[in-house]
Image (spheres, helix red, strand yellow):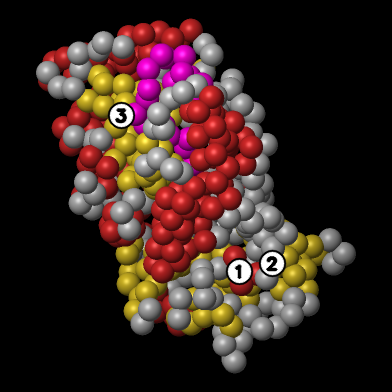
Amino acid sequence: MHILELFPAGTRVDERGDLILGGHRAGALAAEYGTPLYVFDEPTLSARCRAYRDAWAQAYPGSSRVAYAGKAYLNVVLAQIIHREGLDLDVVSGGELFLALQAGFPPERIHFHGNNKSAAELALALDAGVGRLVVDNLDELRQLDQMTAARGERVGVWIRVSPGMDAHTHAYNQTGAVDSKFGFLWNGPALREVLGRLQAHPHLRLVGLHAHVGSQIWDLSLLAESAGRLVDLAADLGRPIEELSPGGGLAVPYTTDDPVVPVSACADRVAAAIVERCRRHRLPLPRVVVEPGRSLIAQAGVALYAVGARKSIPGTREYVSLDGGMADNIRPALYNARYSALLANQADRPGAQVVTLAGRFCESGDVLVRDVALPPLEPGDLVAIPMVGAYCLPLASNYNLVPRPAVVLLRPGRTDLIQRRETWQDLINRDQPVALS
Ligand SMILES: Cc1ncc(COP(=O)(O)O)c(C=O)c1O
């Protein structure tokens, strides 16, 4: 794979060697909005939404919905784009739900996950009329019992099932193993209890079963088997289930060495497993709701950093420091994630030197890309890191009290700031004065 294929669709290098993202010169974007800068290419995001919708419409003979897992990255404008593309939305906190509602996302097309939703978060969801609450544990069921009885409401719920499967991904990205804080173990007593209690519940209507095995999953058989186990459970229930959600999890390539798994291959495999198990159990096909996050948005995002100080340790390592790092992208430090990088202002030049791109934060582990071949770098050069659309900004912090980056939406012929850069003043706005004696 060529490195440009990791960038938004249509990314190219012009005759001057400048990287062109969504028709815009990376250098011009950095000059206008400053660095570090995160840009999102709208056509790439829209194309991924379409690819998901089309793949499931073709692969599955029943009805299907695609819900964007907002935890991968949410912003008011992005939520509006997801809505416009006809997708549903998966949220995991009151904050994400609040943003979605502010963005005008229809509440009935939102489903609400989370292993420890607070009473205030559940109340917000009930007030708003969120389409599906995903019950994660018995304590939550008790809380919902009381809240819906007090309100005299009836709401649709899914049950989060842990399929008891070890995914091959990083341990922190596994969510469906036996040893997991999420959901009811698929063959355990708690699941039987919750299903029993929902059989004739006056306020909670069991609409669906959900499982999510983990994130950055290459092995489609894991996703297919997890979906199959949900159908087996529905068969055990002794009655058809309206909706089935096999979660998200499809992996994306971060470097040119990583494999590419097309969305259509994933949809074909998971859909076939659901159809086969439904036939085996003589069940009607449920509506399938898939929940991709990373594979929907990662490729749309690019981070632009300015090169700063350098440090050469002859025979050991060439450090080049960038003006961002682990506070805007913690994935390399947290998961040992690997990224690729390109010198955006001389993208046509061969990589003549192996360098380590360090972040600016006061941690030795703050390294964005280790051992990458780039042309000689000078202070002021611009480095572009692709595939940063997912799980970077939502995990961003103000470590070392560094303001978080600006976010810009790229469209043909125009660029728009969709989240302004934080200021130093923003960093102290929440501090309260106290009279000290
Ligand atoms: C319940 C649930 N659904 C969907 C997702 C999205 O996963 P991904 O971004 O890997 O597609 C996650 C992420 O962990 C999740 O926990």
**What residue did someone put label 2 on?**
1
Q: Is residue 185 visible?
A: yes
User: In this rendering, is residue 28 above or below 290?
Assistant: below
Q: Going from the N terminus, do you reach mark 2 or mark 3 first?
A: 2
Residue at figure coordinates x 31%, y 13% from the top left: 198
User: Where residue 234 sits in the image (x, y, percent)?
Assistant: 44, 20
Q: Is residue 292 or residue 344 the one in the foreground?
A: 292
User: In this rendering, is residue 30 above or below 149?
Assistant: below
The answer to whether mark 3 and mark 1 are in CB contact below 8 A is no
Q: Amino acid at mark 1?
A: Glu
The answer to whether mark 2 and mark 1 are in CB contact below 8 A is yes
Determine crowd level at label 3: few under 14, some 14-19, many 20+ residues with C-alpha closer than 10 A.
many
| Quadrant showing the C terminus | top left
Q: Residue furthest right?
A: 315
Q: Amino acid at mark 2?
A: Met
Q: Which residues are magenta?
A: 231-248
Q: Is residue 157 or residue 139 the one in the foreground?
A: 157
User: Where residue 163 sits in the image (x, y, percent)?
Assistant: 55, 24
CA–CA distance in space, label 2 to label 3: 41 Å
Residue at figure coordinates x 28%, y 58% from the top left: 84
Say whether mark 1 is within 8 Å of ligand 1.
no
Determine crowd level at label 2: few under 14, some 14-19, many 20+ residues with C-alpha closer than 10 A.
few
User: Where residue 223 sits in the image (x, y, percent)?
Assistant: 57, 37
Give left or right: position of 282 versus 129.
Answer: right
Residue at figure coordinates x 44%, y 9% from the top left: 192
**What residue did someone put label 3 on?**
133
User: In this rendering, is residue 235 above or below 428?
Assistant: above
User: Where residue 65 sits in the image (x, y, percent)?
Assistant: 37, 44
**What residue did someone put label 1 on?**
5
Q: Amino acid at mark 3?
A: Leu
Tally of numbered discs: 3
Q: Which mark is residue 385?
A: none
